Image: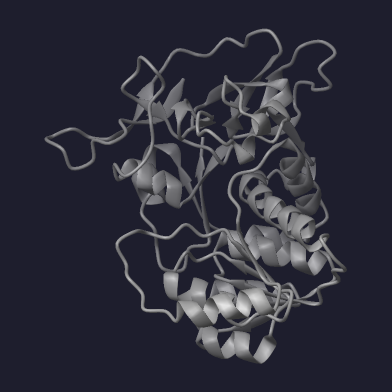
Amino acid sequence: MRALTVQPGTAGKGNSIPVSVEELPDPSPGDGELLVRGLAIGICGTDREIVGGHYGWAPPGSSRLVLGHESFGRVVSAPDGSGFAGGDLVVGVVRRPDPVPCGACARGEFDMCRNGHYTERGIKELDGYGSELWTVETDYAIRVDPRLESVGNLVEPTSVVAKAWDQIDRVGARSWFEPQRVLVTGAGPIGLLAALIGRQRGLDVHVTDLVTSGQKPNAVRALGAEYHSDPVTDVVAKLEPDVVIEATGVGEVVFDAIAATAPYGIVCLTGVSAGGHRLTIDAGATNRSIVLENDVVIGSVNANQRHYAAAATALADADLDWLNRLVSRRVPLERFSEALTAEPDDIKVVLTL
């Protein structure tokens, strides 16, 4: 079978080519595993960081890692009594609990691992789903509605925001909590999918991004949400949102969002910031605002099976035409370098297997 592999940490070193399509032996499913024919993988910033040598770990004993954590495939074979059957559409969960395990992993909340010994398909010490065939444990496989065959790769990024909303609900439940207005900063895949779930919850959703035309503003408006391209400080001052889901990772945006929520506001950070960029902020004023208004700032990353299931449900309930417009480009495996190169108007790039 063909697979997209990378040698983590080697970009720009000598004459090595860090990423390539290579022939690997077909996998054989073990006890309790599905054999799946890969249909496509979604490409995101994490994949580009791994290819760029900034992140990623190969499996023990190997120098190369099969890429691909935004999986989607069709079951070839399934164990008897597993609840799966040949032809089912599935995605595989990315993270696996650490072997120790920590308290969170022992309770199935491995997305909240305390000691960092978890592993991740296509990222950390486990081969990913970027191959023509792959296997996955039935406990870590999520069935996808057949009508989502063209957009199944959106389940993984949707699971990330399904978790974010879950965490927001848990924090809000410390007191009376009936949010009305939500601001999403960033109109990439995470931001748009966060906005989708906000609209499905009946909230007044606003999305801010830098671009003034094109796919992103159109996708926001098609949801029935409001799009803003004004500076974040102006937008939050006008809206005073009850909830902010921050999906850019841009330091200035993060602190502007934190500073201007409604009282008892919740800011959930999902964007990962690059290091080395310094800001000058009024830390005293920020602290005063958070304390006196009972505000909360939380970080959220990854997802467990509960969030994947919620994501699959959210996508099954969404308008299929709207979901399809999130896929900017579909690129065949042999032209992987095109998929790994971001273009200005991209939302989600899919590499077909």
Q: Is residue 100 above or below residue 353?
A: above
Q: How many marks?
A: 0
Left or right: where 333 falls relative to 186: left
Q: Is residue 246 above or below residue 132?
A: below
Which residue is at the front of the view, 324 or 291? 291
Query: Residue 81: image x %, image y %?
Result: 85, 13
Give the x, y percent position of residue 283. Answer: 47, 76
Using the image as rendered, state which of residue 36 and residue 333 is in the foreground.
36
Say how the picture is coloured. Answer: one colour
Q: Determine the residue located farthest toward the left in the rendered image.
A: 14
* Residue 164 image point, x, y percent: 68, 55
On the picture, is 49 further left or further right than 265? left
Q: Is residue 127 above or below residue 28?
A: below
Looking at the image, can residue 218 be seen?
no
Q: Residue at x 70, y 29 (%)?
A: 141
Q: Quadrant of residue 124?
A: top left
Q: Residue at x 46, y 20 (%)?
A: 1
Q: Is residue 76 above or below residue 295?
A: above
Residue 318 position, x and y percent, is: 79, 58
**Residue closest to the eye, 304 or 177:** 177
Residue 242 in which image quadrant: bottom right
Q: Nearer the viewer, residue 91 or 185?
A: 185
Left or right placement of residue 64 versus residue 301 in this view: left
> Residue 99, can we see it?
yes
Q: Is residue 165 left or right of residue 317?
A: left
